Image (cartoon, grey):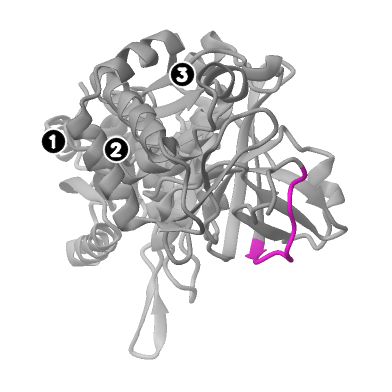
Amino acid sequence: MIRKEWKIRAGFVGFGEVNTPREFIDGRCKTAADELRKRGIELTETAPVSDDPEGKQAQRAVEELSKGDFDSLVVCIAGWIPTWAVIKVIEPFKHKPILLWGLSGWRANGHFVTTADQAGTTALRAPMQEMGYNFKYLVNKKDAAPRYDEAAAFVRAASATARMHHVLIGMSGYRDMRLFGTLYDGNLLKRKVGAEIEHFDLMEIQELIQGITEKEIAAGAEQIRKNWKFIRDPKPGTVENSVRLSLAFQKKIQERGYDAFSFCDVDGVKKLMKFAPAGALTLLHDNLDIPSVPENDSYGAVTELIMKYLTGVSPAYMEFYEFTEKSALMGVPDYVPASVTDGGITVMPNAFGSFGEGLLNVSKVKTGPVTIVRLAQVNGDLVLHAVRGEAKTPETWEEAGWAPPAPQLPSIEVFFESGESEGFLKNVMGQHYIVTYGDNVELIENYAKINGIKVIR
């Protein structure tokens, strides 16, 4: 079943031993559930379960949880609990990722009080591992802050996992510039991630372009001139070319319900249509909240979708131009979505080499903490390469080959958290990496663990 509106959903069940006063179990489980809700998680919740001899509470929990629609199960251990009672509840949901989460005690009347929460979790961890559960073990520490954010990060990763098994990525063409690093193994991708890529010919887009009306073209051109800043006036027809191509791509995406999009750029649009598609993709991002990457970059598009579902924001792709001892100069020779710009969309009509004039996106890019990441294939299996850094505005630079005056491409200089670039370079997986803002490593690691994907740091 594909949800019409995808929300982050989890099942939630607490546990505590039958002889423990119920108020010590109920209250702390409720607090944990409420904190998850505050973090945007919708819960299917059942009352805490104890080890009553007949197992009636466990059966009740199974029945109530079975009525819910959720992607992971939070097993909240609020005290000692015999293992059988927990397994009886969670066994029907063994196919879902599970968070084994042990709470901690509290201070009252000048001393510490515990219900032996970690006796319960430590009795469960090894058996759950041996039984083949796909789970994360999380323990609240005595006199430390509860780990609500970490619990929520796991639930979000589980939701992203479920959602990725329903996605369809549209790709116009195949293997732009005969690149090897943008190829993919469809069977491996389906097995480990769940995504599927559907290819179509650029001729379909050309046919759709023929059906774009003058009214649609005029409306798109007006939208562009109203919302974008132009460094100089374009040649007649440049804006209209971008509108036609963007609307054709948009029609195909909406017709097929694509969740992400890639296209043949250099050997496709530029070679056959004789202009750069940067303006068309910029407009596409204005109208649709869809990740995209050029050059038939298969795993790049998949990475974008994973990160969108983990963070809730469509990210941008960038490629490497230079490295220093501590940093990487990352930029794009075409477009960025408005979500990563600082000050809105700025375009510059320009041409590169033998390609005709297009609307080159030259917007300023946001700075701050970033996580750059890429899904890749290594020795027949998938890996995620992810590193943290600080994005800063780079010095003035240009890419040779653009018609003068050369543009300042959208770019950032990423200073690696490690303080040096050599470690990153030893593992770099391609020219394109996906740029996300903030520290998203924990989300990535949770997603990777759930799906049996190795993380390279």
Residue type beneath disc 1: Lys
Callout 2: SS:
helix
Which callout, 1 or 3, points to the residue nearer the camera?
A: 3
Q: Mark 3 points at which residue?
A: 171
Q: Are marks 2 and 1 in contact (CB under 8 Å)?
A: no
Of pointers 1 and 3, the one earlier in the residue sequence: 1
Q: Give the range drawn in magenta.
A: 390-400
The image's mark for residue 56 is 1
Where is residue 404 shown, x and y percent of the image?
70, 50
Where is residue 85 shown, x and y percent of the image?
29, 37
**Residue at the spot 50% in from the left edge and 38% down from the top edge:** 278
Callout 1: SS:
helix
The image quadrant where one finds the C terminus is top right
- Badge 1 crowding class, 10 Å Cα cut-off, few under 14, some 14 to 19, many 20 or more, is some
- The residues bearing labels 2 and 3 have C-alpha atoms spaced at a distance of 49 Å
With respect to residue 315, does 84 lie above or below?
A: above
Where is residue 359 shown, x and y percent of the image?
49, 43
**Residue at the spot 76% in from the left edge and 38% down from the top edge:** 428
